[in-house]
């Protein structure tokens, strides 16, 4: 490929990092909604004398969370490792499949209808099956469920990104005698990154859901799903809600970590500057 090809790439403008005041203005609405929502929840539960088995008060949930923080966050970490394993395996397999399907379009045309049909199967139906395959007390059975949930959105979004390149960009690369590998490396893969990271951020939430759902069908007592199911069965509803809160905390942290990687690796793309 000639050196002239490199001159066709435009230099991205320097990013202007938002000030602290701008960040506060960006996040203030969400924080206000959170505070008002929790306050309304607390007020309605106390004002209407809602039974604890229907909906405990946030103050009672937070108190239980603090008292059992060691056990609950230990269970949360156990479940998070399952979600992370499934996320990694599902994402890697999805990206590899998307690259193959983007390279050979006829294969994609034949395979995608079956992929969509499989994605329509409720994930809860896979849990007993994966438990039989890998063992109900093994982490791999929950990783399999998380991986299945992550696979399809990452596959579809990555494939869309790989195939949504402007035809003029492909023609420009071919005019410089670039081969398919070079086109994939310099055009298709960079263009697919916004689609990929969008799917990965969705996948973090799906992975946590898959891991927790899988733990409802026979799991280690260290698992967060077991804590939720067992606490609800024993009418310890504050503990069950505290465990759900821990799952949310790990899910948000997982999402934020992927979003941070996106911001660090894609500073050149305008999508990372939205709201700045």
Image (cartoon, rainbow, N blue to C red):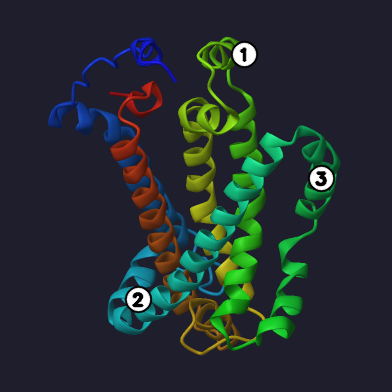
Quadrant of the rendered image containing residue 92: bottom right
In the drawing, what numbered circle is on residue 73? 2
Question: Image point 64% across, 68% down: which residue?
Answer: 145
In this orientation, which residue lies closer to the viewer: 52 or 95?
95
Q: Is residue 276 above or below residue 64?
A: above
Question: Badge 1 is on which residue?
Answer: 167
Q: Is residue 176 above or below residue 160?
A: above
User: SS at mark 3?
Assistant: helix
Question: Badge 3 is on which residue?
Answer: 111
Residue 95: percent from left, percent from top: 58, 47
CB-based contact (under 8 Å), mark 1 and mark 2: no
User: SS at mark 1?
Assistant: helix
CB-based contact (under 8 Å), mark 1 and mark 3: no
Q: Is residue 275 above or below residue 172?
A: below
User: SS at mark 2?
Assistant: helix
Q: Is residue 160 above or below residue 8?
A: below
In this orientation, which residue lies closer to the viewer: 103 or 272?
103
């Amino acid at each position: 490929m000639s050196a002239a090809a490199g001159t066709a790439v435009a230099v991205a403008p320097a990013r202007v990092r938002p000030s602290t005041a701008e960040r506060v203005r960006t996040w203030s609405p969400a924080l206000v909604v959170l505070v008002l929502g929790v306050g309304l929840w607390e007020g309605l539960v106390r004002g209407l004398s809602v039974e604890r088995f229907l909906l405990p008060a946030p103050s009672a949930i937070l108190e239980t969370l603090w008292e059992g923080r060691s056990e609950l966050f230990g269970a949360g970490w156990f479940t998070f490792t399952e979600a992370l394993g499934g996320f990694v395996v599902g994402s890697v397999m999805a990206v590899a499949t998307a690259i193959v399907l983007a390279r050979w379009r006829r294969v994609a045309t034949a395979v995608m209808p079956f992929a969509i049909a499989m994605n329509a199967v409720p994930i809860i139906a896979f849990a007993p099956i994966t438990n039989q395959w890998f063992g109900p007390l093994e982490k791999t059975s929950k990783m399999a469920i998380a991986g299945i949930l992550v696979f399809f959105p990452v596959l579809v979004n990555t494939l869309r990104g790989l195939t949504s390149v402007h035809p003029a960009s492909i023609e420009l690369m071919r005019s410089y005698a670039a081969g398919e590998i070079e086109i994939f490396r310099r055009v298709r893969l960079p263009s697919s990154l916004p689609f990929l990271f969008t799917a990965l951020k969705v996948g973090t939430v799906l992975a946590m859901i898959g891991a927790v759902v899988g733990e409802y069908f026979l799991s280690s007592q260290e698992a967060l799903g077991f804590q939720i199911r067992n606490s609800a069965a024993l009418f310890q509803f504050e503990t069950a809600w505290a465990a759900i809160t821990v799952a949310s905390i790990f899910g948000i942290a997982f999402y934020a970590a992927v979003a941070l990687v996106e911001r660090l690796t894609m500073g050149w793309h305008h999508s990372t500057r939205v709201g700045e």
